[in-house]
Amino acid sequence: MQEHGLEPDFPAAALAQLRAIGAPAAAGVPGVRDLRALLWCSIDNDSSRDLDQLSVAEPGPDGATRILVAVADVDGTVAAHSPLDAHASTNTTSVYTAAQIFPMLPERLSTDLTSLAAGQERPSFVVDLTVTTAGEVSASDVYLARVVNRAKLAYNSVAAWLDGKGPMPPPVAAVKGMEEQLRIQDRVAQALKRVRKAQGALGLTTLEAQAIYEGAQLLDLCPDEDNRAKELIEYFMIAANSVVAQFLEAHRSSSLRRVLRVPERWNRIVALAAAQGGSLPATPDALALSAFLVARQRQAPERFADLSLAVVKLLGAGEYVLKRPGEPAEGHFGLAIDDYTHATAPNRRFPDLVTQRLVKAVLAGRPAPYDEATLRTLAAHCTLQEGNAQKVERQVRKSAAAMLLAPHVGEQFDAMVTGVNEGGTFVRIPHPLAEGRLIKGFQGLDVGDAVRVQLTHTDMERGFIDFVRAR
């Protein structure tokens, strides 16, 4: 982390500020709505305690549904330019390694005082969406509110229940009306998904390596796969983040936007599609790419994760940019959306905390807490640190994979090419989910190609995993 400009430890001044915080921020300030009686719930990973958002559904006009997304008011506890904020603005993100999590904010805040913890009253800002039966957002609002999380739920158990493959999670059964709540939320999320896909949003299945431990012993790196409950949260967050971007624009506030530019390696995406029987236009077209991906997922679901990874690599990385009011938006190619920011995870991403402060300033009629020059600098820094955090996470994951693979030197694996650049040619194997360098036999290969490889060397300290092409 230190090599990549990240602080693994909280500075003394930040810890002193933490010790002085005795309770959550007050929620009962004038103008804040009281929404504590609603059936709010959180859905996150099984082990997550840094709960950034809640959701609830209510009947709307003409058969529409109101979806309310509450976001934790982190700014109420962590003031701008304070020592804790300085640390957060340095790292700009929580760093999730296979060995340890390095939170952007101390756990006493992110998993307790600024978390939308179960059964606890908390301040929040709410994104209020009216979604038609066709899946269109027909109206929206943003305001401050007091909320209480009525059920802390987990992705896997909720998804299994929604798919009819598992029992109702006990926290759902324990709250009257929560079952209907979740079924309504799921129905609306699927309607939002259909609209997003029709507009060209890319449906990609990316496999993130999840460390499996038994006590202190690392047993495996397994894919953390998508499911229906993750989709529910994903499409609510996309809609909420889009509304927040539009809200700031409507109030003539500069903002941080999350963008994904038109891919520079579109020609390779076209070639990749052609190799799998598809046809894409010569110029970048998100709608055409989305249609190809939908067809491939239906035709070859067992290979779709590999195809998705190849496309993700070729699309390039997202970034943060300054958006000045009235200027054209750069947009997000992967989501096929023009107005998009990050606002829904302020406990773990600094851009979301910045956006929260901009929203609160608009709601209070105060001047923006950041000028355009500062926002431009923050955008570049947050993009840089996001990349640095990913390098650290990847490095530790490689070390973990190298440790797991050390007894298997000499064995062969099916692999897929994930990267070709000046640093070499890289491949991924499915079990354990790991990426390594192809040091021999890489000529003529490109991202997305399938290849048989043999493991020749591992170095846990440096995270090196070396393969040669099997003949």
Image: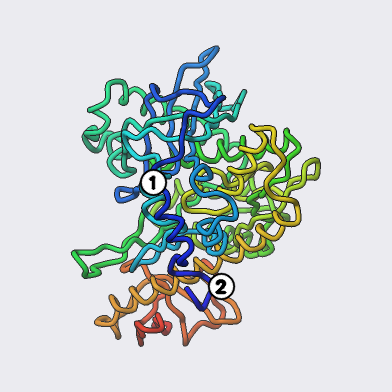
Of residue 350 and residue 168, the one placed in the foreground of this image is: 350
The amino acid at mark 1 is Gly
Q: Is residue 311 visible?
A: no
Residue 106 in picture, x, y percent from top left: 41, 57
Q: Quadrant of the C terminus?
A: bottom left
Question: Which circle marks residue 22 in the picture?
Answer: 1
Q: At 65% across and 38% down in the image, what residue appears?
A: 361
Number of on-image labels: 2
Query: Relative to residue 152, is residue 266 depicted above or below?
Result: below
Would residue 421 appear left or right of 209 to someone viewing this image? right
Q: Residues within 10 Å of mark 2 (few under 14, many from 20)?
A: some
Secondary structure of the residue carrying tag 1 is loop
Residue 172 in picture, x, y percent from top left: 27, 30
The residue wearing badge 2 is 446
Would residue 351 appear left or right of 365 to someone viewing this image? left
Secondary structure of the residue carrying tag 2 is loop
Q: At 42% across and 55% down in the image, what residue appears?
A: 18
The amino acid at mark 2 is Asp
Q: Is residue 206 visible?
A: yes
Query: Relative to residue 146, is residue 411 depicted above or below?
Result: below
Q: Which mark is nearer the camera, 2 or 1?
A: 1
Residue 293 in picture, x, y percent from top left: 53, 49
Q: Residue furthest left?
A: 215
Residue 336 in picture, x, y percent from top left: 64, 44
Query: Relative to residue 17, is residue 125 depicted above or below?
Result: above
Distance of label 2 from label 1 (alpha carbons) = 55 Å
Question: Which circle marks residue 216 in the picture?
Answer: none
Q: Earlier in the sequence, mark 2 or mark 1?
A: 1
The image's colour scheme reads: rainbow
- Rendering quarter of residue 470: bottom left
Q: At 30% across and 51% down in the image, what residue appears?
A: 47
